Image (cartoon, rainbow, N blue to C red):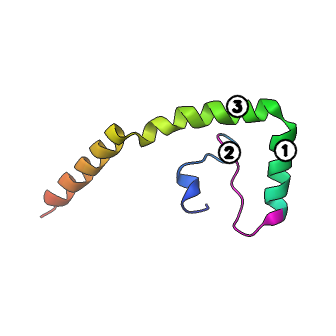
Amino acid sequence: MIPGPAEIISDGGSGFLVHQGDTNAFAQQLMGLILDSELRIRFSRSARDSVAQFTSDVIVVQWQEYLESLVSVK
């Protein structure tokens, strides 16, 4: 797993993940996106759907639960 982006992007679902510095893989994936309008549309829709898990309402609840779990560990 590629740390960071893999927590947000589903490889092949809402985008592509390539290893840092792998310019050949990046170029191949980019060319695929350029040539495939259906793929661009699918990635776009999937990305819009997945962004819901990162709204401030969701994140605040997660932080609250995490902080409460720390207090109850005593």
Quarter where residue 24 is shown: bottom right
Q: CA distance from mark 1 to mark 2?
A: 11 Å
Distance CA(mark 2)–CA(mark 3): 9 Å
Question: Which amino acid does the dot numbered 2 rest on?
Answer: Gly
Q: Which residue is mark 1?
A: 32
Magenta span main SS: loop
Neighbour class for label 1 at 10 Å: few (<14), some, many (≥20)? few
5 in the magenta segment: no
Q: Residue 20 location in percent, x, y?
A: 69, 67
Image quarter hosting the C terminus? bottom left
Residue 23 in percent (x, y) is at 81, 65
Which span is picked out in magenta?
14-23
- Sequence order check, earlier mark of 1 and 2: 2
Q: Residue at x 21, y 55 (%)?
A: 67
Rendering quarter of residue 73: bottom left
Mark 2 crowd level (few <14, some 14–19, many ≥20, 10 Å Cα) = many
Instruction: Based on the picture, tell me whether residue 15 belongs to the magenta stretch.
Output: yes
Q: Secondary structure at mark 3?
A: helix
Give how far across and how far down residue 8 sits, in percent. 54, 49
Q: Residue at x 35, y 41 (%)?
A: 56
The residue under label 1 is which amino acid type? Gly
- The residue pinned by badge 2 equals 15
- Closer to the chain start, of discs 3 and 1, is 1
Q: Position of residue 70 (x, y in %)?
A: 20, 60
The answer to whether the residues at label 3 and label 1 have Cβ atoms under 8 Å apart is no
Give the residue number, with chain letter if any, for mark 3. Answer: 42
Residue in the picture at 24% in, 48% down: 65
Tag 2 secondary structure: loop
Q: Is residue 16 left or right of residue 30?
A: left
